[in-house]
Amino acid sequence: MAIWVLYVNIYSLTFTTMNAKAKLSTYATLTIAFCSLTIGTVLAQIKLTNQSKLFINGIGQVRVGMTVSQASQAAGTRLISDPPNNDCYYVKPQREPKEIGFMVTAGRIARIDVWRNREITTLKGAKIGDTEARIKSLYPGQIKVTSHEYIIGGHYLTLIPKDRANRNYRVVFETDGKRVTSFRSGKLPEVEYVEGCS
């Protein structure tokens, strides 16, 4: 909004003292500059970064159900594959953000894992390092707590959505019994696979 106001102010001030040819040239230059700035801002918002937000069925512009090619295009970065394990494998951004992965089953994104990236958060701000109490307070009445399969005293805090449209999706926060150590979102049943593709 501020950019648009600046653009209009420059436009009106410049045009009051120019001849027709100069006005046209200035208008074209200002329009190109404004469009470039707008396109650059939109592209920066589309590219997957550490500021991208994880939600129940995606992260940034990437959605569960996309093919790897679609997800790569939506992420604005190449997705590199681990060696496929039958019908389940992971792809990861070639560069940034680090420590995240997309589980692929039946050729489509099934879930998003955030392993050790402390910058990526959910839409409500949940992240690695948060206490179990904070997760429960961010999602009151929606967290199901179960015992961790491998960490004594650890838990899975599973966000069960209220919205019927999202009933086949979950966000799972893994904890050491006190703090979140990793989290993931995606569709059932893959989002609840304890060992990923193993």
Image (cartoon, rainbow, N blue to C red):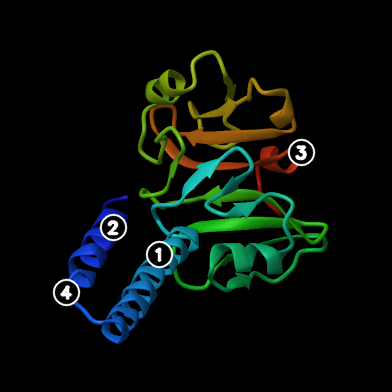
Residue 169 falls left or right of residue 142 = right
Q: Residues within 10 Å of mark 1 (few under 14, many from 20)?
A: some
- Displayed quadrant of residue 133: top left
Going by the numbered disc 2, the residue's amino acid type is: Ile
Q: Position of residue 29 (x, y in %)?
A: 33, 80
Q: Residues within 10 Å of mark 2 (few under 14, many from 20)?
A: few
Q: Measure how far apart labels 1 and 4 are at the Cα level.
A: 27 Å
Q: Measure how far apart labels 1 and 2 are at the Cα level.
A: 9 Å
Could you tell me which secondary element the residue under label 4 belongs to? Answer: loop
Going by the numbered disc 4, the residue's amino acid type is: Thr
Callout 1 touching callout 2 (CB < 8 Å): yes
As drawn, the label of residue 190 is none
Q: Measure how far apart labels 2 and 3 are at the Cα level.
A: 46 Å
Could you tell me which secondary element the residue under label 2 belongs to? Answer: helix
Q: Which residue is mark 4?
A: 17
Q: Which residue is mark 3?
A: 189
Q: Residue at x 70, y 31 (%)?
A: 166
Q: Measure how far apart labels 3 and 1 are at the Cα level.
A: 40 Å
Of 164 and 40, nearer the camera is: 40
Q: Give whichever of discs 3 and 1 has the lower sequence position.
A: 1
Of 39 and 145, nearer the camera is: 39
Going by the numbered disc 1, the residue's amino acid type is: Thr
Q: Which residue is mark 1?
A: 38
| Tag in front: 3 or 1 | 1
